[in-house]
Every structure is written in structure tokens, then in C-alpha cells.
Amino acid sequence: MMTFKLFKGLAFVALIAGTITGGPSVAAPGDVENGEKIYMKRCVWCHGEEGEGDGPAGDLLVPPPRDFTGGLYKIITTPFDEDFPNDADLFRMISDGMPGTDMPGWKDILKDEQDRWDLVAYIKAFAELEEEPGVSVDYGTQVATSEASIAKGKELFHEGDRCSECHGQDGKGDGIKKLKGDNGERTWPRNLTKPWTFRGSNDPKDIFTRVSTGIPGTQMPSFANPKSKVKLSVEDRWNVANYVQSLAKTDKVVAAENTVVKANRIEGDVPSDPNDPAWDTAELTTFMMVPQIFEKERVFTYSNDTITLSAFYNETELAMMLEWDDRTRSIPGDPDIDKIADKVPFEDMISVQLPVTIPEGTQKPYFINGDTNNPVNLLTWRSGTSETPQSVSAANATGSENIEERDAANIGLVASSAYKDGTWRVVMKRPLSTSNAESDLQLVEGRFIPIAFANWDGSNSETGTKHTRTTWYWLLLKPADSAKPYILALIVAGIIFGGLVWWAKSAAKDQEV
């Protein structure tokens, strides 16, 4: 019998759910027998021996592995009235994988293209598919992206809430419609500002294809269907594709080399309001968040994957802005939230984790709530309920089983928030120094201070240990510009000049002698 450890190790192996455009134009004949050998070695763990998506790792994956027996796929290039994909669709999916899922690209492992074509042949056999449709979406003449095309696409996107009903006003997937897949599972509209989550890339041609075919098995319709009241012409679908591509974030994205939240020193009060224009001048740092799967009550169906930070400080206080996309403003007890939430909604939450003492070496506390020898401060904001306002709390922890609640007011911790168009902005403030140096981190200018974050999407049933989080990064209170370097340079220059004068005078005396 296969062990859980092995299952866990295979949890991020193959998930086959569809494919995207751009694969080889001509399919190569596949060898079903060889395809079966590859499948049993590479794919069976997620998709199961009979291709029903019930492999031993299948329950751990979101979205779940594709059931091949129906022959239906979400990401295809065939017209909306064709039920099945082209072989090239499957080939590209196997080769490149599917971003935002656990389905990896296999072209670096199955380097021989023929192996991948053989796998296509075997996968098709599960649904007894023989001939491929052999037709693709009518792409017409591509409309190049331009200001005019993007403006037209935006108009069509919002016209009659054609797309914004589900994707929201800014494309962040914060529409107020509860969506379900054909199997009854809860689905969420794509956040179009995060192209790295697109199953089929955010290339305009791929977006055009999705708009044209829809996504079978979901509530994403085809806008090429002539019977649809919201149908679009080929030209208009290109305009919408150009607009959707233009929504991609450019300033709040993860940069691997940027691991430091930089707090700039300012004179006067630090900003308390999330909408204070001062935040527009702050330095931004964005981190990737991952699901908490290391301790019991894990989460696999997480929804938030990034957080953006900025900070200011003055001689007494630090203010941090925490910003993240969230499709819903989770206020338990609000009828609108109860209606669209997945199961029972909880409060949205964000937590900042800091060590009680700045480490002198490389050893940092365990990244989930610290450890016995390395306690941490936990500063947490909650969105509130229909009966209670938003709140902020503080705690100290030496592990998840040992968390001690504290009085946030005594520490001087305060927070304020704003939610708009699918984005939370929360400002937390605390003093640089507190009266309890044994229990509170004392913030020091110019030191690299470990910092980590955790986030809960209440409408996605995230609570307790079910959340997303980061590992340790750094917080730096940047020293203000100082005149010291210039003074030192002048002193050094003066010493050198004096030495040269002395040397010149000595040389002149020697010549006189």
C-alpha cells in the first residue's frame, strides 16, 4: 500500500485539466502502448489508473485532477459548439502544464516529443476518442493592441455588466455572483490583474480563445455563440482581449530580488488613513503567499496569493500599509456575504509576525508562530462582523500550541482599513519602543529585522490554521540622509591636503640646502 508520505510527495505531480493554444499545428500519430507506460509512471498518481481523476494524490489538489473518461476539457481551441479538444490542445497542456494549478509542464522531462504524442493517444483512449475535431476558433484578423482598442474593449467589458458581473469593475474577480462548476463545486472568477494565475496564459490570442470558447464545465460562457444575448463579433473579442491583457499588474508584483520592506523616515506624523496620499510615495514590496500545509488543519483551496507592503516611520512610530486582493469583504452576518461565501464565512484577517528580539546571527524563529527559544510578536487585524466592528489584537507565541493573548492598547497597536473594488488596505501602527522590552520587539533604525505575514480569506472558509502565509523576509527602517558622510569626506580631504602642503614645503627646504 502506498504511504501517506509518498502521496504527499506526489501531491504536486500531474493534474490534467485542459490545454491552451499554440501547440504544434499537426499532430503526430501516438503509440497507445507506450503512452500507457508513461501514464502509469507519471500521471496515475493524480489521475488514477482508470483516468477518473481519483489518484491517491487527487484529493489534495485544487483544482482537482481532470477526469479523462468524459473527454471534456476546460482549456480548448475548438469552437464553442465542439465538445472535444484537438490533439494539439492536449499536447500543449502536457508540454507546458497549467499555471495556477499543480499540473506541471512535462517537456523538460519527456524531452522526446513522440512520448508526449503517445501520452495524448493514451489519454484520449479513456473517453474512446478517435478522430479529433480538426477545427479551431475563427480568429479572423487580429486587432493589434492600442489605446483605442483597449478603450473599446473596456466599454464592451462593462456594457450590460457583460464581464464585470463576475470579474468586477477592475477585473479583480470581485463580482457578487456565486459561481459553481458543473459538478457543483464552488468556483471563483479569475482575478484578471494577476496573469500568472491564467490557466492558458495572458497572451491576447489565448485570451481571445477563452472569450470565444468559454470554459466548459464552468459558468464562463462563449461570447461567440450567435444565440447569446451578450455575443461579440470577432473584432470586439480582440478588443476585449486587449483590454483584459492591459489589466495586468505592473507595480505590485513579486520581484525575487526584493526581500526587504523599506520604511522611509519622515518628519511629522506617520499616515494613519489607508487612503492618505502619502502612501502613493512609499516604496512597495510584494511577497508571494503560500497555503499553510505544514501543520494540521491545512488549507489547499486558498484564494489569496500575494501581499504588498509599504511603511513609514518617524522618531516614535512605525506605520505599515498591508494591501492584498480579496474577492469579498467578509463580514459574517452580512446577508450579501453569506450568499456568496463558500460554506460558513469568517472574518478576513491579516497578521504581522516579528521576533521579540532581533537575531544577532542567521538563526530566526520558526516561521509559523516561533518556537520555544525564539518567541514572536503577532499583530493581527480582523474585518469585524455585522455586530462587531473591525479590531486589532496582539499576542506572543512560542509555537502554534502556545499563543498568549495580550492587550493591544497597552502596546500602542492601532489599525484602520479600507476595502474597495476587491482590494483590502490596512494600516497598522505601533511605537518604535514599548515599556515592555522583554515581551515586545524594540524597533531599531538601520537594522534588518525579520518579518512575516499571514492572511485569511473569510469567505473562503479560512480560519485558524487554514490560511496563507509567507516565510521570513526583512523590515528595514532606513536611516535618514545624514551630513556625516560629507563631513568625514571633508576631514579626510583636509588631512590629505595638509600632508601635501607639508611635503611640498619640506621638498623646497631640501632644495635650498
Image (cartoon, grey):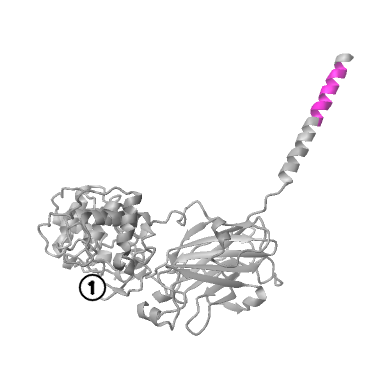
Q: Is residue 220 magenta?
A: no
Q: Is residue 29 left or right of residue 143?
A: left
Between residues 198 and 361, which one lies in front from this camera angle?
Answer: 198
- What amino acid does circle 1 point to? Asp
Between residues 44 and 335, which one lies in front from this camera angle?
Answer: 335
Query: Vertical placement of 393 versus 266: above or below?
Result: below
Q: Residues within 10 Å of mark 1 (few under 14, many from 20)?
A: few
Residue at (54, 65) in percent of width and height? 275
Q: Quadrant of the N terminus?
A: bottom left
Can residue 434 be seen from the camera position used here? yes
Pick out the residue farthest to the left.
131
Q: Main secondary structure of the magenta part?
A: helix
Query: Vertical placement of 263 versus 181: above or below?
Result: above
Q: Is residue 51 left or right of residue 252?
A: left
Query: Vertical placement of 333 versus 134: above or below?
Result: below
Residue at (85, 15) in percent of width and height? 511
Residue at (60, 67) in percent of width and height? 272
Q: Position of residue 78 (x, y in %)?
A: 17, 58
Q: Position of residue 66 (x, y in %)?
A: 24, 66
Q: Quadrant of the C terminus?
A: top right
Residue at (32, 75) in percent of width and height? 178
Q: Is residue 241 left or right of residue 440?
A: left
Reading the image, the residue beneath label 1 is: 182
Can residue 201 be seen from the camera position used here? no
Q: Secondary structure at mark 1?
A: loop
Q: Position of residue 277 (x, y in %)?
A: 56, 61
Q: How many marks?
A: 1
Q: Position of residue 406 (x, y in %)?
A: 62, 78
Span colored in magenta? 498-510
